[in-house]
Image (cartoon, rainbow, N blue to C red):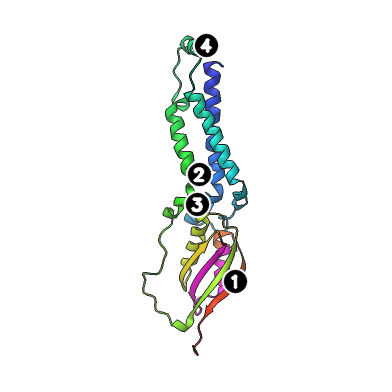
Amino acid sequence: MSNSNQSNTSSKSIGAGLLVAFTASLCCITPVFATLAGIGGIASAFSWMEPFRPYLIGLTVLVLGFAWYQKLRPRTQEEIDCACDENERPSFWQSKKFLGIVTVFAVLMLAFPSYSGIFFPDNSKADKVIVVKEDDILNTELRVKGMTCTGCEHSVNAALNNSEGVLEASSSYKSGIATVKFDQTKVSIDQLADTVEEATGYKVTEKKIIQEKTLNQ
């Protein structure tokens, strides 16, 4: 393989690896982007890609691994002679340095769910003084369809914690459940479900009171 063909193959591998890594992370990046940009309803746009994520991660590793193999493998005498004849140095875009940058970026993309929480402000109300009657507090579980990673959790949490009357809210993509403690005089369960659906696009399939206090207790 000539030096020019090798460089072209390596460049294509780098580009393909970057594209696949970004595609593999779309289902996790979109909820964060949607929440930060205030674009309601699109957080769940790429949640359908989650089942394909392991395969896309594997493909990213294979493509970038091939690109590194092309860069690091010993060159044959023919390739050395060809490079000398062409008397050209590879551009930055075909260099090991650029491949290293792309590899680091790809790793950051693939690991995005593990640190996506840093992009969300702390909306927890645990440290805030909120005056509410104990008998007005309800706890509910919302079953949310479409959450696939921690980025999804953070978008649901942000939507709920920004709602008036919500005292605490947390969600789990593994169980598909969001638990909410709220003041029933300020917000209803139906309103909370609507908030999740409008702000994130995820569908609330079930609403259940898990604890109710009455004046007689």
Mark nearer the viewer, 4 or 3: 4
Q: Please report contact status of discs 1 and 2: CB closer than 8 Å, yes or no.
A: no
Question: Which residue lies at the image location 55% right of the left edge and 28% below the top edge?
Answer: 12
Q: Would residue 24 be visible to someone looking at this image?
A: yes
Residue 174 in the image: state x and y as whole percent. 55, 59
Choose the circle earlier in sequence order: 1 or 4. 4
The residue beneath circle 1 is 207
Determine crowd level at label 1: few under 14, some 14-19, many 20+ residues with C-alpha closer than 10 A.
some
Determine crowd level at label 4: few under 14, some 14-19, many 20+ residues with C-alpha closer than 10 A.
few
Is residue 180 placed above or below 24 in the rendered structure? below
Which numbered disc covers residue 110? Answer: 2
Residue 190 belongs to magenta span: yes
- Disc 1 and disc 4: Cα gap in Å? 70 Å
- Disc 1 and disc 2: Cα gap in Å? 33 Å
For the N terminus, the quadrant is top right
Mark nearer the viewer, 1 or 4: 4
Choose the circle earlier in sequence order: 3 or 1. 3
Q: Amino acid at mark 2?
A: Leu
Q: Amino acid at mark 1?
A: Lys
Q: Secondary structure at mark 1?
A: strand
Is residue 74 placed above or below 130 in the rendered structure? above
Q: Amino acid at mark 3?
A: Phe
- Disc 4 and disc 2: Cα gap in Å? 38 Å
- Disc 2 and disc 3: Cα gap in Å? 16 Å
Q: Would residue 162 be visible to someone looking at this image?
A: no
Is residue 108 placed above or below 93 in the rendered structure? below
The residue beneath circle 3 is 33
Residue 145 in the image: state x and y as whole percent. 61, 61
Q: Secondary structure at mark 2?
A: helix
The residue beneath circle 4 is 78
Choose the circle earlier in sequence order: 1 or 2. 2
